[in-house]
Amino acid sequence: MPLDLLVVDDDDDFRSTVVRRLCRRGFPVQEASSAEQALDLAERRHFVVAVVDMVMPGMSGLNFLERLRAAGSDCKVIFLTGQGTIESAVEAMKLGAYDYLQKPCPLADLERVILRAGEHYSLEKENLQLRAVLQRARQGVQMIGQSPAVKELFRLIERAGPTDKAILIQGESGTGKELVARSLHQCSLRADKPIVVVNCAALPETLLESELFGHEKGSFTGAISAKQGLFEVADNGTLMIDEIGEMPGSLQAKLLRVLEDGSFRRVGSLKERRVNVRLLAATNRNMMEEVRAGRFREDLYYRINVMSLQVAPLRDRREDLPLLVEHFLGPEWQLADGVMSVLERYTWPGNVRQLINALERAKILADNKTVRLDDLPHEVVSQVPATGGGAHADPSDHSLASIERAHIVEVLAKEGGNKVKTARALGINRRSLYRLLEKYGLS
């Protein structure tokens, strides 16, 4: 950020001396001989630091600062005065002056104060920008969970997001690694630029190279025109490479180069191109094992792994299941008694992605916007132990299946064996009842 300066003093000799000194140091400087002239300049140009004489004919330095703040300026004001008192210094600080120096003061001291004021201004701007970015992140990308693992992930995203460093996101398939990447992007200073995602496992080697780095017309069969690669599309933004452990060795060297100096060549081109891209990589593999096995370059591994984020599998954050189910089902849907217990007991090898698919399937089969056990996929329900085929359940068996079976037997008996009335009393259709009767050996 250029440190635009304004020097305001009615003493022409002193003002000229200060301006010459600052100009020799390379600062862009404007000068004014009165507070009125300085206000006119401040209306037409933004200044980072103003060096202002406190006592001048006409408007005083303190009045100048009041007018400056009333106009919304955040310029850092350094007061100079040859008639200083403790009272005037206190009043200046109350009005928001950055510092207060007495004349005559060594110009080297004044220069140091100006530099400190400029650094303070830059830090304030950066903090405001980071807070705005984090606020956009919380609003823009929704990650769900209250478990310790998710809270720690949130903390790391907020810390790592605003940096420009490469991040390696590790976790099983279906845990939401792309959502983590998008959250990191939203927390970054590149949030208003694009985030581009490519999956290494979805493309063969030749197409992956073209997809990442682009190609020139005629560089291979079917290349009927030149095409930008995703590095160019993501320039000044973020590129997420998913399943980076699947990347062929021949492309790993080319990726390493673009990460080191930002340069690359399109397929079929001799022209060097340069980009400024933040890389986020994701994998479900153990990358250190891939390095030891010689399938992944060690130097590239350390380049993409400045920091690693681990996304916990769903089985290790079961306390988040009610929140996830509520979110993905929607506000109009509900679960029948016992369904949540079954969901919490299942191990979810496919993680959140599998949970979403299971709930979508259940919504297709469910009646009256209520998900029941028989609406869930077989593999989810089959983990719940069923009782034997006899007419009576073991009284010592307190499993969910045993309780459900006993409840069906009770209602069936109460309705005199009438399956239509039993289904109605249970709140299910006859087809669902027949499935349950067969499941529990009550046919």
Image (cartoon, grey):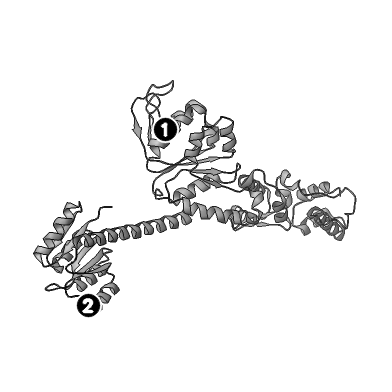
In the rendered structure, the answer to whether residue 71 lies left or right of residue 434 reads: left
- What is the three-letter code of the residue carrying label 2? Thr
Kindly indicate the quadrant of the structure image that contains residue 110.
bottom left
Residue carrying label 1: 257
Query: 196 or 368, which is in the foreground?
Result: 196
- Rendering coords of residue 330 (x, y %): 59, 55
Residue ranking furthest to the left: 12
Numbered circle sitting on residue 221: none
> Which element carries disc 2, helix, strand or loop?
loop
Q: Is residue 205 above or below residue 5?
A: above
Residue 142 can be seen, yes or no: no
Residue 411 can be seen, yes or no: yes
Query: 170 or 219, which is in the foreground?
Result: 170
- Rendering coords of residue 325 (x, y %): 63, 54
Query: 210 or 111, which is in the foreground?
Result: 111
In the rendered structure, the answer to whether residue 400 lies left or right of residue 334 reads: right
- Tell me which numbered mark, 1 or 2, is placed earlier along the sequence: 2
Residue carrying label 2: 85
Q: Residue at x 23, y 66 (%)?
A: 78
Q: Is residue 337 above or below residue 301?
A: below
Q: Is residue 101 above or below residue 320?
A: below
- Crowd rating for badge 1 (residues with CA inside 10 Å; few <14, some 14–19, many 20+): few
Query: 6 or 202, which is in the foreground?
Result: 6
Q: Residue at x 26, y 68 (%)?
A: 99
